[in-house]
Amino acid sequence: MARVLVLYYSTYGHIETMANAIAEGARSAGAVVDVKRVPETVPREIAEKNHFKVDQAAPVATVADLENYDAIVLGTGTRYGRMSSQMAAFLDQTGGLWLRGALNGKVGAAFVSTATQHGGQETTLFSLITNLMHLGMVIVGLPYSHQGQMTLSEVVGGAPYGATTIAGGDGSRQPSEIDLEGARHQGKLVAQTAAKLFP
């Protein structure tokens, strides 16, 4: 069975919800899945004052955890069209893994959240995917086999590069069922791909 890590950073819980949907999809394809988060870099008193979701069920990952998986799916909210500083700080510590080629040939994927439809979803996905490719990973996106991303009757997330959701400027919009379907679909594809590469 393929081992999949869903590794995320979520300030307000939107990406946490998407991470659990990615995991659900991967498990539906028979993978063993762990959901973990990167460390928070904002002091707790500031995070609480700004209404961060500070109590999340997922354990905090270490860089050493990464090489124990056949596939790694990264998720984060967008910061000015790129990944959050928390996720960047974590990935900046993977130089040793890169040097040893520890993740070469493994499966990588990405998912994100933005405040608005045009808030940088695709550039943020690529900011994650670029790191995964430098680490030697094989990328799985969200193909149009998830046709929900083509919906025009409502606001939906989704891009061929990964699952996405839109939180709204005040964070009040939660991932829709179509957004969650996209996340589950991508998770399933990641697990299926990993199973083929690591039978």
Image (cartoon, rainbow, N blue to C red):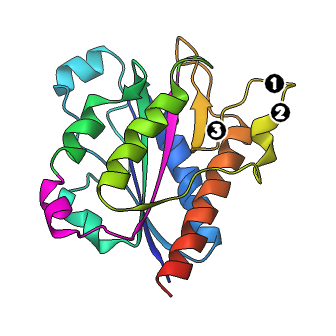
Q: Residue furthest top?
A: 169
Above or below, 148 against 171 in this view is below
Question: Residue tagged by mark 2?
Answer: 151
Residue drawn 43% across and 30% down? 77
Q: Which of label 3 and label 2 is nearer to you?
A: 3
Q: Which of label 1 and label 2 is nearer to you?
A: 2
Above or below, 197 against 162 in this view is below
Q: Is residue 137 left or right of residue 135?
A: right
Q: Earlier in the sequence, mark 1 or mark 3?
A: 1
53, 107: nearer the viewer: 107
Question: Residue tagged by mark 1?
Answer: 154
Q: Is residue 188 left or right of residue 54?
A: right
**Residue contact between numbered discs 1 and 2, judged by CB atoms under 8 Å:** yes
Q: Is residue 114 visible?
A: yes
163, 95: nearer the viewer: 95
The Cα–Cα distance between marks 3 and 2, rounded to whole angstroms, is 12 Å
Which residue type does callout 1 highlight?
Answer: Glu
On residue 159, which mark appears? 3
Task: Check disc 2: other Cα within 10 Å, few if <14, some if 14-19, many if 20+.
Answer: few
* Helix, strand or loop for disc 3: loop
Q: Which residues are magenta?
A: 94-114
Q: Quadrant of residue 69?
A: bottom left
Which residue type does callout 3 highlight?
Answer: Ala
198, 77: nearer the viewer: 198
Residue drawn 20% across and 57% down? 63
The Cα–Cα distance between marks 1 and 2, rounded to whole angstroms, is 7 Å
Which residue type does callout 2 highlight?
Answer: Thr
